[in-house]
Amino acid sequence: MPPLDTLGRPLGSLRVSVTDRCNLRCHYCMPEAAYTWLPREDLLSFEEIAALVGIFTGLGVRRVRLTGGEPLLRRGLPRLVERLAANPAIEDLALTTNGVLLVAQARELKAAGLHRVTVSLDTLDRARFVRLARVDALDAVLEGIAAAREAGLAPLKIDSVLVRGVNDDEIVALLEFGRRAGAEVRFIEYMDVGGATRWTPEAVVTRREVLERVAARYGPVRPLPGEPSAPADRFALPDGTVFGIVSSVTEPFCRDCDRSRLTADGIWFLCLYARSGIDLRGPLRAGWDPPALAALVERVWRARDDRGAEERLGLERRVPFVPIDALRRDAHLEMHTRGG
């Protein structure tokens, strides 16, 4: 049995960032002109990542997701996938990507043992894509989605962050694209996490609004049963098309959250909203053996009481989570460092 935290949540899912770098500058994640990066000498090697993941799977983690920044920027990533795929405790090995580099790597990642991918796609309009991401890469992303499907990286999912007045007029278009692409679209409420320095409450397109707009276009929407710890609630259209909504802002799922995040330099965060994390790189490089590392992880998890999104929901006045000056002092406060 995996250890339980103070709210009875098991240690079940681990998001592993392999780099804090990204080749896009999406407005909701990296809107500023300059960033502070992690020192390269601090980045974990593939051997170190696999070793730490082994500690977590030994304690009950069964789902591992590789993230960034943009994980496909990490050279030799299939070698890490191959190492992790050899771990028999991992039941679900996934990757989240912006898709720009996916065409060149999809088949190799599948051959290495990756199970599935989630691709971020917020618009189908080229001019809008350039405004949102500050790079003209829409065609590459669409080709990457097709390559993932052809490589058998399934089930394929598409994540779309909705921002009022920016791309919320594309809800139906994104659903239709997902249907054609054989992918499940998940609409994500714009979150006020570290890095979202332009966030305002008014910019959030809520779960309720999404459901109302979808029902107005397609007819009654049916909720589907799902895993309690899954971030997205899933729904079906009358024709059976399935989509999801991640409503972390207006309807948080903190009480069921079993996930934590390991940064590319080995800092372990228990919540996306956590102000600080636990250094696992230091003990690992100092020669701690697996039982000692496991004891540290278990002790910290059992003391966990984080429910950041719930606490943010209860604030009387809600502003961006971390001021810009604090982000410049500590890269670990950035969402692109923690892996979203």
Image: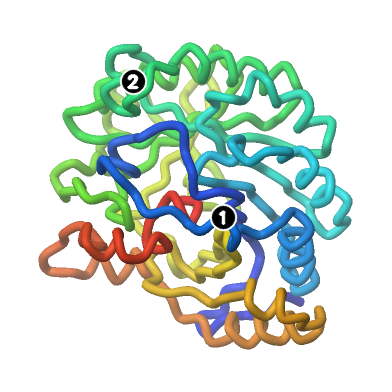
Asked if residue 305 lies left or right of residue 104, the reply is: left
Across and down, in percent, residue 244 comes to 47, 38
CA gap, disc 2 to disc 1?
A: 30 Å
Circle on res. 129 = 2
Instruction: Give the quadrant of the N terminus.
Output: bottom right
Badge 2 or badge 1: first in the primary sequence? 1
**What residue appears at the point 63 percent right and 60 percent down from the top-left corner?**
13
Image-quadrant location for residue 300 = bottom right
Callout 1: few (<14), some (14-19), or many (20+) C-alpha neighbours within 10 Å?
few
Residue that carries the numbered disc 1 in the rendered image: 40
Residue 108, image x, y percentages: 78, 28
Which residue of the protein is positioned furthest toward the left in this rendering? 317
Give SS at disc 2: helix
Q: Residue at x 53, y 24 (%)?
A: 100
Q: Name the foreground residue: 74 vs 259.
A: 74
Neighbours of disc 2 within 10 Å: few (<14), some (14-19), many (20+): some
